[in-house]
Amino acid sequence: MKTNYSKKAADVVMNIRALRENRNYTQDYMAMRMQISQNSYSKIELGNCKLTVSKLLEICHILEVAVEELIASDIKKVSFRLADGPVIYQELYTSFKRQTNVRTLYPGDRQPDIPLTEIPV
C-alpha cells in the first residue's frame, strides 16, 4: 500500500504529464529544454526516479505553471483554467467583432465600400 507521500508524488508526475500533453509538448521537447535524455525525462513521468526540487522548478518554468498548481491534487481544475484562456479571448474577440462589424482583409480582397476617417492624434 502506498503511503500518502507516495500517492502525492504519483499525483504530481501525473499532473506533469497531463499539463505537458495539454500544451502539446512531447517528451523529447521537455528533455531537450531540460538538457537531459528523453529516457531520463520519461522516468520522471513514470515516477521511476526521484524528482528533485530543481527539476520540479525547471518543469514548472517550461510548462509556465506555478509549483502550487502542479502539485494541486485536482489537475482538472488546472487544465480547465489553462484551457479557459483561448476560449475567453475567442469570446471577447467574437463579441468585439459583432459590435464593431470588423472584417479581416486578405491579400487580393476588394477594399470595403465605407469611408475611412482619420483619428486625430
Image (tube, helix red, strand yellow):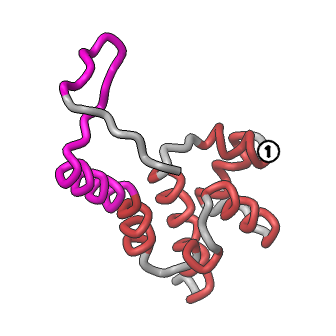
- In this image, 9 relative to 119: left or right? right
Is 41 above or below relative to 8?
above
Is 43 above or below relative to 70?
above
Location of residue 60 (image quadrant): bottom right
Q: Where is residue 10 in the image (x, y as percent from the top left)?
A: 56, 72
- Residue shown at the point (56%, 81%) measured from the top left: 8
**Nearest the eye: 7 or 75:** 75
Does 96 lie within the magenta span?
Answer: yes
Give the amino acid type for the residue marked by disc 1 in the picture: Ile
Q: In the displayed orientation, state which residue is furthest to the bottom.
A: 4
Q: In the displayed orientation, state which residue is furthest to the front.
A: 120
Is 48 above or below relative to 116?
below
Is 73 above or below relative to 52?
below
Does 104 lie within the magenta span?
Answer: yes
Q: Position of residue 57 (x, y in %)?
A: 74, 67
- Residue shown at the point (45%, 53%) measured from the top left: 22
**Nearest the eye: 82 or 91:** 91
Q: Where is residue 31 in the image (x, y as percent from the top left)?
A: 71, 44
Q: Dot 1 lies on which element? A: loop
Q: How crowded is mark 1: few (under 14 residues within 10 Å), some or many (20 or more)?
A: few
**Nearest the eye: 44 or 68:** 68
- In this image, 54 relative to 112: left or right? right
Q: In the displayed orientation, state which residue is furthest to the top.
A: 108
Q: Where is residue 64 in the image (x, y as percent from the top left)?
A: 62, 60
Location of residue 110 (image quadrant): top left
Image label count: 1
Kindly identify which residue carries mark 1. 36
- In this image, 97 relative to 20: left or right? left
The residue segment tinted magenta is: 86-113
- Residue shown at the point (32%, 62%) measured from the top left: 88
- Residue shown at the point (76%, 40%) measured from the top left: 37
